[in-house]
Image: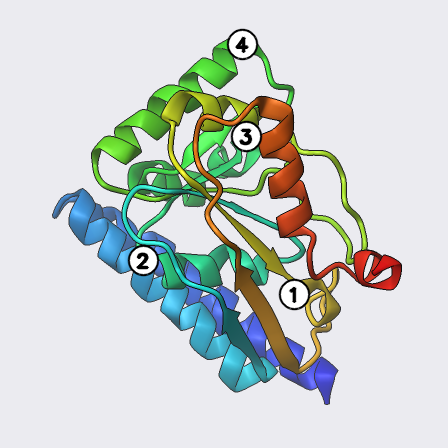
């Protein structure tokens, strides 16, 4: 049953996504605000496909932030990348440059206002990231970053990448950490399992803390649902 559900999801969602990307170019002619509403509709389409075809739904814990905020989230699957778009409304997402370079999709993503970053962490790349983030904040948008830098398996807790510290220091925004457990149901590969994904918004961490203190608090908060940490507790 899980295989059949997963095949149906792949056919409907990715088929719909191809059409969505193609239509996005004429939509973009109406301006950035229209494109952002269009992308939000696509994220809601993903939520519908996940719930209806895969049987995956979200249990929300904590308070969803509003206004300019730096949201730092765990990353275990594709599920949260679009679910957080729905929950946050219109975030500017920090993502690896390789994704923003994908033909067609990457072009739409850049028009939408994603913030590409070179995971090598070079100084020029960090400056470009900070400039794009300041522009997004000036436009009233939340910044969404996956500070561990890549998708990880449940139980893995790698250190934060340098980009988070740069954004935290330069933007001077409160940080809202997000823990989640999507990897239990949405592993790498085709087959997904039905169930409930917990997305937990933690308490805001104020700006201006020393780098090590801020990173330690964020790291602990985004990994609060990890099975290895529960075992230790």
Q: In the shown orientation, is residue 219 left or right of residue 130?
A: right
Mark 1 or mark 3: whose residue is earlier in sequence: 3
Residue at left offset 63%, top offset 50%: 222
Please tell me which of labels 1 and 2 falls first in the chain. Answer: 2
Horizontal relation, residue 181 to residue 137: left or right: right
**Disc 1: CA contacts within 10 A as few (<14), some (14-19) or many (>=20):** many
Q: Which residue is mark 2?
A: 89
- State left or right for residue 117 relative to residue 173: right
- Farthest residue in the bottom direction? 1
> Going from the N terminus, do you reach mark 3 or mark 2 first?
2
Disc marking residue 123:
4
Q: Secondary structure at mark 4?
A: helix
**Drawn side of residue 216 relative to residue 25, left or right:** right
Indicate the secondary structure of the residue bearing disc 2.
loop
Residue 106 or 157: which is nearer the viewer? 157
* Residue at the spot of label 3: 164
């Amino acid at each position: 049953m899980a295989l059949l559900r997963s095949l149906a999801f792949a056919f409907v969602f990715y088929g719909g996504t191809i059409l969505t990307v193609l239509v996005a170019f004429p939509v973009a002619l109406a301006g950035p605000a229209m494109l952002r509403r269009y992308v939000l509709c696509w994220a809601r389409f993903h939520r519908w496909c996940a719930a209806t075809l895969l049987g995956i739904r979200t249990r929300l814990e904590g308070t969803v932030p509003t206004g300019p905020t730096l949201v730092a989230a765990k990353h275990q699957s594709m599920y949260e990348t679009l679910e957080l778009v729905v929950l946050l409304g219109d975030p500017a997402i920090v993502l690896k440059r390789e994704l923003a370079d994908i033909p067609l999709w990457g072009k739409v993503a850049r028009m939408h206002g994603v913030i590409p970053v070179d995971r090598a962490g070079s100084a020029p790349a960090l400056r470009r990231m900070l400039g794009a983030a300041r522009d997004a904040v000036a436009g009233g948008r939340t910044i969404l970053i996956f500070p561990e830098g890549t998708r990880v398996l449940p139980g893995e807790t790698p250190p934060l990448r340098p980009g988070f510290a740069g954004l935290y220091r330069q933007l001077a925004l409160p940080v809202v950490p997000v823990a989640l457990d999507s990897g239990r149901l949405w592993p790498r590969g085709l087959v997904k399992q039905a169930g409930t994904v917990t997305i937990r918004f933690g308490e805001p961490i104020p700006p201006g803390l020393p780098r090590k203190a801020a990173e330690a608090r964020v790291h602990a908060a985004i990994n609060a649902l990890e099975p290895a940490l529960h075992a230790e507790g």
